[in-house]
Amino acid sequence: MTGGTTAIIGTGGLGSAIARRLASGGEHLRLSSADAGSAGALAAGLGGAAVVAADNLDALRGAGAVVLALRFTVLNSVIEQIAEPLAGLVVVVPSNPVSTDADGNIVNLLPPGQSSGQVVAGWLPPGARLAMAFGTLPAGVLESAGNRSPEPAVLFYAAAGDRAGEEAERLIRTAGFEPAKIGGIEQSGRLEVGGDLHGLVVGPAAAAALISDGG
């Protein structure tokens, strides 16, 4: 079922790709970004499917879920800013806990064995429902792999509780993919850069085998 309203905070490469995939499936979007020009250009390209909100709080108005398509280093500060209304929402986080050093090398921001899902769950207010999704594929691959035929491509996700899982699956299907749950939030390390499920474009049968092999 499509046609819901989702807020997207962050309209960089990945946020824009997620927005385009969701809009193509009939989702209504409320966009917010530190770069107002980026959000405005994205909304213009999506036509009536998206509006630009006045700010992050305004983006949540009327939305049943929010995608925080932000760098991991700014996630906590944005969550603190909008904490009160998040308490009733499904929060979808695609962010990978990585950055680059002075030489351009990718570095992990978390210690070994700690997943981004566990960290983000600790930042959220009580009542918010967390799903880690849409961060396993680069933006360009996410856009090109949607609505694949004859076999759909899978997007892996991890979720805390049934409601978060149901909404994550609805959004993944709206975006043109088949959802595949890997488990609870504690499993989200498998989705991150360096995880065994990151960067894979596979069909449902292969996805099921991969989940089982690594679970």
Image (cartoon, rainbow, N blue to C red):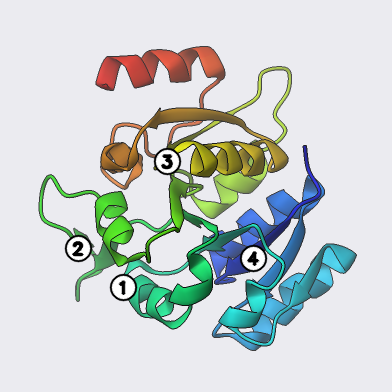
Element on which disc 4 rests: strand
Image quarter where the N terminus lies is top right
Specify the amino acid type for callout 1: Thr
Disc number for residue 73 = 1
Disc number for residue 138 = none
Element on which disc 2 rests: loop
Q: Quadrant of residue 176?
A: top right
Front of the two marks 1 and 3: 3
Q: Nearer the N terminus, badge 1 or badge 3? A: 1
Q: Nearer the N terminus, badge 2 or badge 1? A: 1
Confirm or deny contact between disc 4 and disc 1 (CB under 8 A). no
Label 2 and label 4: CA atoms lie apart by 26 Å
Front of the two marks 4 and 1: 4
Relative image position of residue 73 (x, y in whole percent): 31, 73
Location of mark 4 (residue) = 7
Label 4 and label 3: CA atoms lie apart by 18 Å
Relative image position of residue 30 (x, y in whole percent): 71, 70
Disc number for residue 109 = 2
Location of mark 3 (residue) = 159
Q: Tell whether 87 sits left or right of 141.
A: left
Label 2 and label 1: CA atoms lie apart by 9 Å
Label 3 and label 2: CA atoms lie apart by 21 Å
Image quarter where the C terminus lies is top left
